[in-house]
Image (spheres, coloured by chain):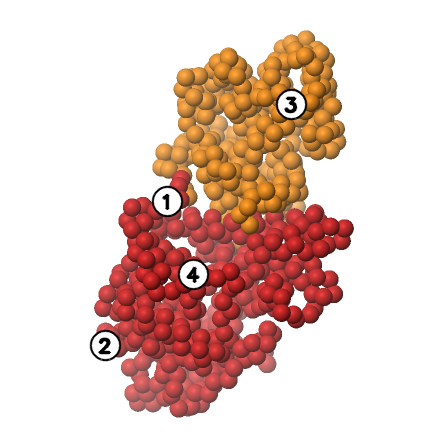
Chain colours: A orange, B red
Amino acid sequence: MNLDFSDDQKYLQEEARKFFDKENTLKSSRNILENKLHTDECLWKKVVDLGWTGITIAEEYDGLGLGHLELCVLAEEMGRVLAPIPFSSSVYLFTEAINKFASDEIKKDILPKLVSGEIVGTIAVTEELHAPTSKNITTTVKNNIVSGTKIAVPDAKIATHSIVVAKSDNGIDLRLIDHSLDGICINHTNSVDESRGHFSMSIENVPTLLIGEEDNGWECYERLVDQAAVLFSFEQLGGAQASMEMALSYAKERYAFGRQIGSFQAIKHKLADMYISITLAKSNSYYAAWALSTESPDLPIASATARVSSTKAFQFCSKENIQTHGGNGFTWEYDCHLFYRRSKLLSVNLGSISNWKNRLVTGLEKSNVS
Amino acid sequence: MDFNDTKEQAEFRKKCRDWLEANASLKSEKANNSNFENNDYLQSAKDWQKKKFDAGWAMLHWPKEYGGIAASPIERIIWNSEEAKFDVPRGIYDIGLGMCGPVMMQYATQEQKERYLPTMAEGKEIWCQLFSEPSAGSDVAGLRTKAEQKGDKWIINGQKVWTSGAHYSDYGILVVRHDPNLPKHKGMTFFFVDMKSPGIDIRPIKQITGGSSFNEVYFNDVEIPDTQRLGEIGDGWKVAITTLMNERLAVGDANGADVNEAFKWAKGQDGIGGKLIENMAARESIADWYCEANGLKNTKLRTMSALSKGDTPGPEASITKIVSANKLQSIGNFGMDSLDMAGMLQTDDSNIHDFQSAWLGSPGLRIAGGTDEILRNIIAERVLGLPEDQRVDKGVPYKDIPSGK
């Protein structure tokens, strides 16, 4: 029985925490947000140099050849400091898509460049002001040529490539697009969390490569999302923990009515509830990490369980962190709002909580366990 | 990460399993509703405990001289998880073996330990816990049952309440006030008492469920020899705290209808315009309970992982009762609501019965063994390190503390 990370994985996590502290990452996140710089390119380069973009890429493609558990501990640390880098887009989604579904030829071309940082990827799915489904995608692909418009594409500016979800003759394709080609126009869109840039992408008659099976792209996308949800959960868990720690230290140092506000039960119970939500999220994320790393058939249910729990934890902790800070929490100057913003970004990227709850119950219906 | 036993653990599990298979039968689909008023249940619990004792399974982690095998925490967990799969009468000994035993182990004389611990493990003698009083619930230290020393005896007068199993218990552990002039935490002393002593009057409490699992226990000039004092005079609170720590370990998951029952029910139950499971609100609730149920299960696995490695587990298990008791209440509510007006009716349908039991029983679980509010205080203070609440009764002689009516 061992539902815990190994000593090596814990060591990697500690090193990551030290690294992000040294880099003053939370401060950088604020800077990116305030100046709409989209990405901390300097930090990104250092992350690439540490080899972290190649964690799950095999050694034959210049990667570190480690597993998803290492990625989980890194995700938690990035969530903790709101790292303003395209790690989730490029590593959890784009890299995994190539790793899992691309032909050997594409792998040989792309994977080493993901390791070296020459290529940065993202995924372009959303098109309208509602959730994308296999039925409502209008971006089309015909004879490998893609046309359409995507919105809310994270990190599209620093990304050199993206996976585009497009409607094919008989279904959905995942298509690899090179951003340097003619016909692609990428524009920044203001968003609620500017510590990560979001963009619209218009694609006009651009040649693309197929990733995975033809017409079967939606199923591939769903499998990708099942995997990525585990890593998102760890980012959310890290963010929730950082929010609780902020609230905790403020509750100890702030005095009102002649005493520390943390000595009042109203504040204590709020913090206890944060701890409860984090403990549930952490335990479910650990189980999902196991399911991800062993490619367990339980992954769809495990990842949805982790995802729902972590979304709840980060949303709850970040909003109650503001509340614990009182008026200070509502100021631009305090960092509370940075966590509040990121909690919303992470909760809608990959689909909102009610979609995930539905997905979880659908998973239960499909499995014969219950 | 893996969920496998080590070689030693697997061997131990097999040993447990082999013995259980030879001596009990696996649980049937329908849960066995325990009934503490039922003499047959009491007798079968005693028989089962004796059977375990004779084979060395009764108190695994206890030292050999008291009937244990000095098992490791992980072996204890393995035994418990295997025993839980079998249809055996459990529950009656939880308080005695989980709370009274450890206190006796720590504070009784050698002679007393030899006299009382093996009979406790064997199940021959049942023990109960006498702490709560009508005016001392969450604030147990506010208790007022009086102890006066007379020579080598103490005379006890007062009333205890919420005593599980007092009516079938042979002994009890008792905390009382020996000096109301001292501040409240300093004026208490701890004893164990023969429940058949003259002057003890036990009356069942009728609960909102209609059942009676608890009692009021009245003490009228009850004599306890000073040799049955546990700890020094005035150490009552210190000893009680040891016991309460064990209670928090003993009170865990709220048993009853869980997410699987709610899910199965929703698949079969008609809702408005289709099966209940097609209703988005129902789906969201089921997802929430699934996350909570599995969050607790996986938290337990993390605790076991630490024990399995020989590490001390973190404080994560402290969330168990708050989460599970509230989940139980909400599932009971869901099940009854899903029947619309018919949800009020008591029928023979076991599903409906389970939802109603959950709904009526869960308020008690949110209170017993530390209310939701006290448990949140404990998490905040002991786990998160927040300052203690500021109190008006600190350092004040007990008799001067405002007590209302």
Is A83 placed left or right of B333 in the picture? left
Q: CA distance from mark 3 to mark 2?
A: 80 Å
Label 1 sits on a secondary structure element that is loop
**Are the residues under badges 1 and 2 in a single subunit?**
yes
Question: Where does label 2 land, which residue?
Answer: B111
At label 2, the amino acid type is Glu
Please give the name of the residue rendered at 43% of the width and 87% of the height, measured from the top-left corner: B200
Is B344 placed left or right of A346 in the picture? right
Q: CA distance from mark 1 to mark 3?
A: 40 Å
Question: Where does label 1 land, which residue?
Answer: B4
Q: CA distance from mark 1 to mark 2?
A: 43 Å
> x, y (%) of residue B265?
63, 56
Please give the name of the residue rendered at 58% of the width and 45% of the height, measured from the top-left corner: A364
Q: Earlier in the sequence, mark 1 or mark 2?
A: 1
Chain under disc 1: B
> x, y (%) of residue A77?
49, 34
Chain under disc 2: B
At label 4, the amino acid type is Leu
Q: Which mark is residue B26?
A: 4
> x, y (%) of residue B273?
76, 50
Q: Earlier in the sequence, mark 4 or mark 2?
A: 4
Q: Which mark is residue A215?
A: 3
Q: Please tell me whether mark 4 or mark 2 is closer to you in this view.
A: 4
